[in-house]
Image (tube, rainbow, N blue to C red):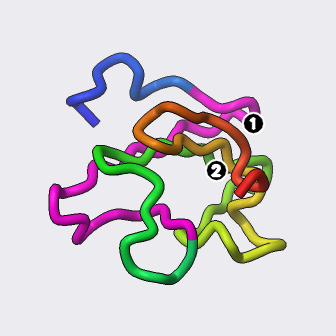
Amino acid sequence: MSDIGAEANIRDPWKHLYQYYPIPSDHSGAYKSWDAAPNQFLNDDFDLYSLGSDGATDNDLNNDPGPSMDDIIRVSNGAVVELGSAY
């Protein structure tokens, strides 16, 4: 978290800290994905997401209804930021 500095303490609307997850260049550690299929990642550089109102998350956004539906997620390397339910 030190690489994002003061931004590490920003909270979502439900008072949870945003979750920062750096992704290795080979995607071996990518957390958020479109679904369980390989190479369906939301970002190439890092994932940034909230835990939503329920304080829970899931790496697969297609688990509907699921714990990621109310997460605020960063997609396409920051080009899009919206609720997980949009995916």
> Where is residue 27, by image quadrant?
bottom left
Image coordinates for residue 12, horizontal then vertical, percent: 66, 32
Question: Number of callouts in the render?
Answer: 2
Q: Is residue 14 left or right of residue 73?
A: right
**At 74% across and 30% down in the image, what residue appears?**
13
Packing grade of label 1 (10 A; few <14, some 14-19, many >=20) is few
Q: Is residue 67 left or right of residue 29?
A: right
Q: Name the residue nearer the viewer: 11 or 29.
A: 29
Vertical position of residue 82 compared to residue 41: above or below: above
Amino acid type shown at disc 1:
Trp
The overriding secondary structure of the stretch rendered in magenta is loop
Q: Extreme top residue here? A: 6
> Where is residue 81, by image quadrant?
top right
Q: Is residue 69 left or right of residue 76?
A: right
Vertical position of residue 62 compared to residue 5: above or below: below
In reply to whether residue 28 is colored magenta, the answer given is: yes
> Where is residue 77, by image quadrant?
top left
Q: Name the residue nearer the viewer: 75 or 21.
A: 75
Residue identifier under label 2: 51
**At 76% across and 59% down in the image, what residue appears?**
69
Region rendered in magenta: 11-34
Image coordinates for residue 58, horizontal then vertical, percent: 59, 69
**At 64% across and 50% down in the image, what residue appears?**
51
SS class, disc 1? loop
Vertical position of residue 9 compared to residue 81: above or below: above
Image coordinates for residue 31, horizontal then vertical, percent: 41, 64
Question: Which badge, 1 or 2, is on the more N-terminal residue?
Answer: 1
SS class, disc 2? loop
In reply to whether residue 30 is colored magenta, the answer given is: yes
- Kindly check if marks 1 and 2 are in contact, taking CB atoms under 8 A apart as contact: yes
Amino acid type shown at disc 2:
Leu
Q: CA distance from mark 1 to mark 2?
A: 8 Å
